Amino acid sequence: MKTRHMAILSVLLTLLSGCKPKQPPKVPDLHFPVAVLFSNSSTVPYKDADDLGIMHVNLLVMTDQHPTLIDSNFDIYTMEHLRSTHGGLWLMAHPSGNTEVEFTLLRAQKSGLEAARAAMRAQLDKQTWRGDLDKQRAALAAQTTLNGMIEILRSNEAADGK
C-alpha cells in the first residue's frame, strides 16, 4: 500500500510542478546545414530538412552503426532507427537510388565545438588511404565552422576519387 501511495504522490508532485517529460529533438530543432557521419567513413552534408529526409540507399544498407549528426551549432545527435520509408523489396530494386528516410534523434552526451571536432577527427582517421592525414588533422584542428570541417573531410574523399 505504501508503494502505491508513493507512486500517486510522485505523479501529483510532477503534475503540480508543471514538469513535462523532455521530448526528443526533432528535425525542425536542428540548425542547418548539418553533417551526418556514417560508420564507413562517409561524411554527408545536408543543407535543409527536406535534403536530410532523402538518403542514398547504400548509406542505409552499408552502415553498421547509428550515424552521428552534427548541426551548425555543434549540437550532436545519434540518428537511431534510421530506415527507408520503403520496404526491402523496393530497396533491392533501387540499389543505387535515393530513398526517403525516417529516424529518431537522440542528443549525444557531449556537444560543442570540441566534441564536434573530435567526432570529425575520428571520421578523418578512418581515411587510412590518405597520405596527408597529419596535414588534414592540423587543418581540421584549426577549423571553427561546420562547413569548414565538412570541406576537409570531403576533400579527402574527392582527392581519392570517392
Image: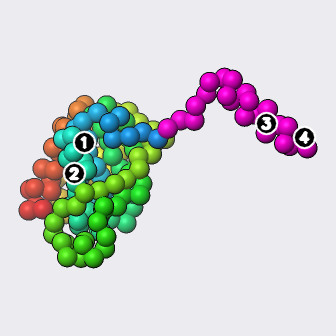
Question: SS class of the residue under badge 1?
Answer: helix
Q: How far apart are marks 2 and 1 (CA)?
A: 14 Å
Q: Which of marks 2 and 1 is nearer the N terminus?
A: 2
Q: Sequence-wise, which precedes: disc 1 or disc 4?
A: 4
User: Do the numbered discs 1 and 3 sit on residues whose CB atoms are within 8 Å?
Assistant: no
In the figure, is residue 26 to the left or right of 149?
Answer: right
Q: Which mark is residue 44?
A: 2
Quarter of the figure that contains the N terminus: top right
Q: Which numbered circle lies on residue 49? A: 1
SS for dot 3 = helix
Question: Residue 110 placed where, x, y %?
Answer: 45, 38
Q: Mark 4 points at which residue?
A: 2
Q: What stretch is highlighted in magenta?
A: 1-23
- Could you say which is closer to the camera, residue 124 or residue 54? 54
**In the rendered image, is residue 45 in sight?**
no
Could you classify mark 2 by the number of other residues whose Cα lies within 10 Å: few (under 14), some (14-19), or many (20 or more)?
some
Which of the numbered marks, if any, corresponds to residue 114?
A: none
- The residue wearing badge 3 is 8
Q: Nearer the viewer, mark 1 or mark 3?
A: 3
**Badge 1: few (under 14), some or many (20 or more) residues near its Cα, within 10 Å?**
some
User: What SS does tag 2 mark?
Assistant: strand
Q: Distance between the residues labelled 4 and 2?
A: 54 Å
Name the kind of residue labelled 2 in the image. Answer: Val
Disc 3/disc 4 C-alpha distance (Å):
10 Å
First in sequence, mark 2 or 3: give its number.
Answer: 3
Q: Position of residue 128 (x, y in %)?
A: 24, 61
* Occupied quadrant, residue 5: top right
Circle nearer the viewer, 2 or 3: 3
